[in-house]
Image (cartoon, helix red, strand yellow):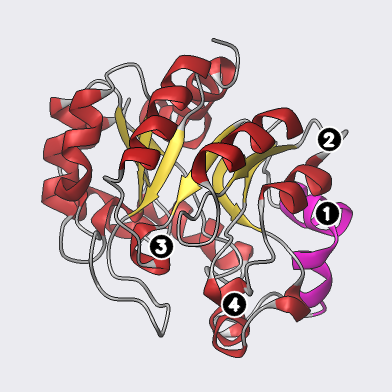
């Protein structure tokens, strides 16, 4: 598998509510969330144990992380690794967006995750528009958080998949992944959008794997537009996640696309335009 949605950083630099969020669902007996989240070698061991061959490691430079998990931290954690693919973070409330983009490119960042809802920013500012254009030019995929956010101080704004439709239409060469597929209220909107726009995908992070055909409809229609993501460690035990995947009884060809084929195609182009 390729896991397109894994968080890492320094557990002890997280705000208390985010520490609580990451420990709400227990891990397997004997596993230590503070070590796994903080030490890349431990996290790689853990993920490989559960069948993950590569993982997208996400930065999140916002209030909940005390602005600590930036592109520089994630690039350092992934440096020299053929397992982790580093995705940066730009928060225009905290960064000069264009300068942070240049810095991230120099660090070897292979894509970005943006959190307009969690970080309370407008994804349509002039600076962010310039960032999307540069990501398109450099072949860097981007991820937007969609669906309700658990950040205690965030407004529930810019959370619907349709909030990002104009970006998809304006940058047809920009690969965009709608994280969480708009959970829990906007799955149908997410499905409609990925069928409408060639450059749009959804990930399965925190989407009930046993209910994929319920929330995303006939998977034969969207099999090439869905990538597997866990949202670990929010997802908790990877063993339980894999049990849910087995219970989903996905046809082998569809499972192959969702679990690694689609992600392979996206990542093979990342940062190589």
Residue drawn at point x = 80 percent, y = 66 percent: 38
In this rendering, the answer to whether 223 lies above or below 136 is: below
* Residue 247 in picture, x, y percent from top left: 41, 57
**Residue position marked by numbered label 4 in the rendering:** 22
Question: Looking at the rendered structure, which numbered label has been put on residue 106?
Answer: none
**Residue position marked by numbered label 3 in the rendering:** 206
In front here: 24 or 146?
146
Q: Tag 2 or tag 3, which sits nearer the N-term?
A: 2
Where disc 4 sits, the SS reads helix
**Residue position marked by numbered label 2 in the rendering:** 81
In this rendering, the answer to whether 232 lies above or below 193 is: below
Measure how far apart labels 4 and 1 are at the Cα level: 17 Å
Q: Label 1 near label 2: C-beta < 8 Å?
A: yes
Q: Tag 1 or tag 2, which sits nearer the N-term?
A: 1
Q: Label 2 near label 3: C-beta < 8 Å?
A: no
Q: Residue furthest top?
A: 273
* Residue 110 in picture, x, y percent from top left: 62, 30
Image side of residue 185 versus residue 59, left or right: left
**Residue position marked by numbered label 1 in the rendering:** 40
């Amino acid at each position: 598998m390729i896991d397109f949605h894994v968080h890492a950083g320094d557990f002890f630099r997280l705000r208390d509510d985010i520490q609580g969020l990451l420990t709400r669902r227990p891990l397997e007996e004997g596993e230590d969330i503070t070590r796994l989240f903080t030490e890349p070698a431990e996290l790689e061991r853990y993920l490989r144990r559960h069948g993950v061959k590569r993982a997208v490691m996400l930065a999140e430079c916002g209030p909940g992380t005390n602005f600590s998990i930036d592109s520089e931290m994630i690039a350092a954690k992934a440096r020299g690794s053929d397992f982790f693919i580093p995705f940066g973070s730009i928060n225009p409330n905290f960064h000069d967006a264009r300068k942070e983009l240049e810095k991230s490119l120099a660090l070897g960042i292979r894509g970005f995750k943006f959190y307009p809802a969690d970080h309370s920013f407008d994804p349509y500012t002039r600076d962010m528009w310039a960032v999307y254009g540069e990501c398109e030019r450099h072949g860097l995929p981007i991820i937007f958080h969609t669906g309700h956010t658990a950040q205690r101080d965030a407004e529930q704004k810019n959370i619907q998949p349709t909030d990002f439709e104009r970006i998809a239409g304006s940058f047809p060469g920009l690969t965009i992944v709608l994280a969480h597929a708009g959970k829990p209220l906007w799955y149908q909107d997410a499905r409609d959008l990925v069928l409408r726009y060639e450059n749009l995908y959804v990930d399965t992070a925190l989407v009930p794997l046993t209910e994929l055909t319920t929330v995303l409809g006939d998977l034969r229609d969207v099999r090439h537009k869905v990538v597997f993501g866990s949202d670990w460690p929010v997802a908790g035990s990877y063993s339980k996640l894999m049990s849910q995947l087995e219970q989903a009884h996905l046809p082998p060809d569809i499972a192959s696309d969702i679990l690694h084929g689609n992600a392979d195609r996206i990542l093979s182009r990342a940062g190589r335009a």
